[in-house]
Image (spheres, rainbow, N blue to C red):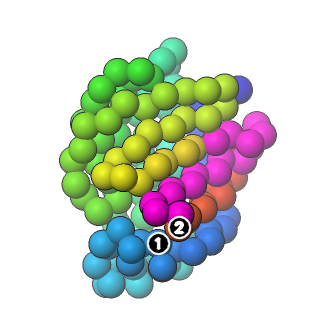
Amino acid sequence: MSFSGKYQMESHDNFESFMEAVGLPDELIQEGKDIKSISEIEETGDHFKVTVTTGTKILTNSFTIGQETELESPTGEKVNSVVMREGNKLTTILNGIEYVTELTDANTLVNTMTLSGMSYKRTSKRM
């Protein structure tokens, strides 16, 4: 399945606790907790461009599977990392946070971030 497309967040679990644990400022946590973010993914072979729009904040990362690249974390830090693909799953680690993006079916995208046993899960549907 191709990841390409636009997805709107439908639900998320453990947002406030997780974002607090990773050091996101309280004002950004309060702003982001009720906003339905939109993720747009462009997949061309092994190259991906991922743009996540949350209110007025836009986060864009481009990468090629298996190659080290600079990625921006949700806290705004730039970190070198390698994104790997296993079937319908993309995985990477930024600052000790494991990121998994999985296409669970043709229309459902699940993002999970895990740090020290604590997880945040966001489920989005294709628009």
Find disc 1 in the rendering and name its residue. Answer: 18
Pick whichever of labels 2 and 1 is earlier in the sequence: 1
Measured from the top left, where is residue 31 in percent x and y?
40, 80
Whether residue 29 appears in this view of the structure is yes
Mark 2 crowd level (few <14, some 14–19, many ≥20, 10 Å Cα): few
Residue closest to the eye, 59 or 12: 12
48, above or below 117, in the image = above
* Residue lying at the far left of the rendered structure: 78
Instruction: Check the picture and name the quadrant holding the N terminus.
Output: top right
Find disc 2 in the rendering and name its residue. Answer: 118
- Identified by mark 1, the residue type is Phe
Q: Quadrant of residue 61?
A: top left
The residue drawn where x is 57% and y is 55% is 112
Question: Which segment did they paint magenta?
Answer: 102-117
Q: Point out which mark residue 9 bears.
A: none
Give SS at disc 1: helix
Measured from the top left, where is residue 35 in percent x and y?
51, 73
The residue drawn where x is 45% and y is 61% is 115
> Principal SS element in the magenta part?
strand
Residue closest to the eye, 19 or 42: 19
Whether residue 2 appears in this view of the structure is no
Instruction: Indicate left or right for 99 with 12 as reference.
Output: left
Q: Quadrant of residue 67?
A: top left
Measured from the top left, where is residue 69 in percent x and y?
28, 30
Is the Cβ of the residue at disc 2 closer than 8 Å to that at disc 1? yes
Measured from the top left, where is residue 82 in percent x and y?
37, 30
Give SS at disc 2: strand
Residue 105: within the magenta?
yes
